[in-house]
Amino acid sequence: MFTYINPRVRTRLIDQGFLKRIDATGALIDSMPSASPSAGLTLNILGPVPLPIHLDGRQMQLRWYAVVRSSELARQDELARALVEQGGQHLFATLTSAMAVNSVLIHDEPEAVEEPLIRVHSSCLTGDVFGSQRCECGPQFMSALNRIADEPGGGAIIYMAGHEGRGIGLWAKAATYLLQDSGENTYQANRSLGLPDDSRDFRDAAALLLYFFPNKTIRILTNNPKKTADLASAGVTNIRAERHLVGVSDWNRTYLAAKREWGHQISEDDIR
Ligand SMILES: [Zn+2]
């Protein structure tokens, strides 16, 4: 809440080097409150926050960076100012829930590695948190974490908060699950709702890769050629996909077959 409540805290965090702003090319730009707004995509990066985690029987010490678009923050700022004027403190919860805050989780020092290992992970509440087997997101997240823990020099996970259901949001995703249960595949279900197959925007992830890992070859854990193509078209040209197939189960074989048909690098044997 600091950015809209107390500008002095923002200034202090900037002075301490905890709050930075980058443009779409990953270059640092002026983040002072007085700086005039830049055109195009700019991201605010807050951190590192030391994050000790215990997952899958493994203890790790991560660096966590919270990341949000300047355009989203500006919208929140405006709403917050209006709320303060009206004395509507209890409404602040609605403000924060609307903002997509992405995360960068870094283990060890991948910045010093020639070809850092990275997972750009789209948020999936049902898979990542609830352990749902309708998709393979949960096992993919856990496997990425284990792989960067075992990797010499570590690695990073960029967790994209606004990517639920390939960009359609959690509410629509629940509806697509019901449509799938009456026979549609994961892409048809999106179309039935009048939504695109995949509306995820990877420009934020690209800017973060360019900022944290400039001039590196990025080894990215994915089976999705569209993801590498989207990152490449946003400027991350030195990129190599590393196979990342885990979590195949009876519950998601049909889902993975649809992904395979759609272009994911999954073989028929993988999902047999
Ligand atoms: Zn999922």
Image (spheres, grey):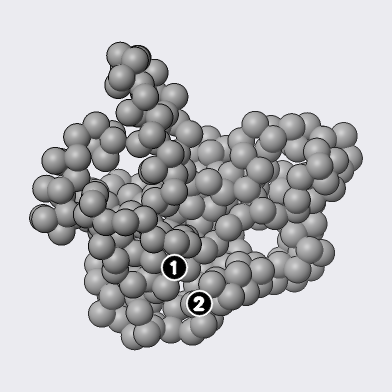
Answer whether labels 1 and 2 touch (C-beta < 8 Å).
Answer: yes
Residue occupied by mark 1: 24
Q: Is residue 164 among the parts visible in the rendering?
A: yes
Where does the image place residue 217, in percent across and percent down from the top left?
A: 43, 84
Residue at point 57% right, 49% down? 163
SS for callout 1: loop
Where does the image place residue 34, in percent across and percent down from the top left?
A: 23, 51
Residue occupied by mark 2: 235
Residue 47 vertical position relative to residue 269 in the rendered view, above or below: above
Residue 190 vertical position relative to residue 95 in the rendered view, above or below: below
- Drawn side of residue 148 relative to residue 180, left or right: left
Comparing 111 with 209, the one in front is: 209
Q: Is residue 102 among the parts visible in the rendering?
A: no
Comparing 42 with 192, the one in front is: 42
Where does the image place residue 96, in percent across and percent down from the top left?
A: 40, 32
Comparing 87 with 158, the one in front is: 87
Q: Amino acid at mark 2?
A: Gly
Residue at the outermost right position: 183
Residue at point 81% right, 42% down? 194
**Mark 2, other Cα within 10 Å: few <14 / some 14–19 / many ≥20:** some
- Drawn side of residue 158 relative to residue 192, left or right: left
Where does the image place residue 165, in percent across and percent down from the top left?
A: 64, 45
SS for callout 2: loop
Nearest to the eye among marks 1 and 2: give it.
1
Label 1 and label 2: CA atoms lie apart by 9 Å
Residue 214 vertical position relative to residue 191 in the rendered view, above or below: below
Residue 8 vertical position relative to residue 48 in the rendered view, above or below: above
The image quadrant where one finds the N terminus is top left
The image quadrant where one finds the C terminus is bottom right
